Amino acid sequence: MILKNKIITDIIINSVEDLYKLQPFLEDGTLKINKSQIARELEVDRRTVDKYLNEYKKYHPETKK
C-alpha cells in the first residue's frame, strides 16, 4: 500500500492566518506543536493560536453600499 500525503515542507508562519499550514502535521501526528511558543512569537493568546489551528477563518462581511 502506498500512502501519499500532501504536506507542505517549507513553512513560514508570519501571522495567525498562516497557521492552517500546520494542520496536516496535526492530523498525521508527525509533529507536536507547542501552541504557547507560537503564541509568544506571534504575540497573541494561545487560545487564538488553537482557534486558528482548528481552521478558523475571519469573517469579512461585505461593505454596505
Image (cartoon, grey):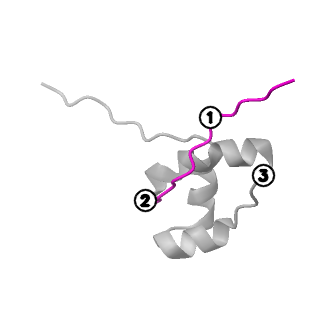
x and y percent of residue 41 in the render? 51, 74
Looking at this view, name the residue that lies furthest to the front. Answer: 2
Asked if the residue under mark 3 is in contact with the one under mark 1, i.e. CB atoms within 8 Å, the reply is: no
> Where 65 sits versus 19, above or below?
above
Compare marks 2 and 1 and give the one earlier in the sequence: 1
Mark 1–mark 3 Cα distance, whole angstroms, equals 13 Å
Disc 2 target residue: 15
Report whether 44 appears left or right of 25: left
x and y percent of residue 23 in the render? 64, 44
Q: Which residue sits at x=46%, y=59%?
A: 12
Q: Which amino acid does label 3 sit on?
A: Thr
Between marks 2 and 1 in the image, the one whose residue lies nearer the viewer: 1
x and y percent of residue 60 in the render? 34, 36
* Residue 18, disc: none
Q: What stretch is highlighted in magenta?
A: 1-13
Q: In which quarter of the image is residue 47?
A: bottom right
Report whether 44 appears left or right of 46: left
* SS at circle 3: loop
Magenta stretch encompasses residue 59? no
x and y percent of residue 61 in the render? 31, 31
Mark 2–mark 1 Cα distance, whole angstroms, equals 22 Å
Disc 1 target residue: 6
- Give the dominant element type of the magenta stretch: helix, strand or loop: loop
Report whether 32 appears left or right of 64: right
Disc 3 target residue: 30
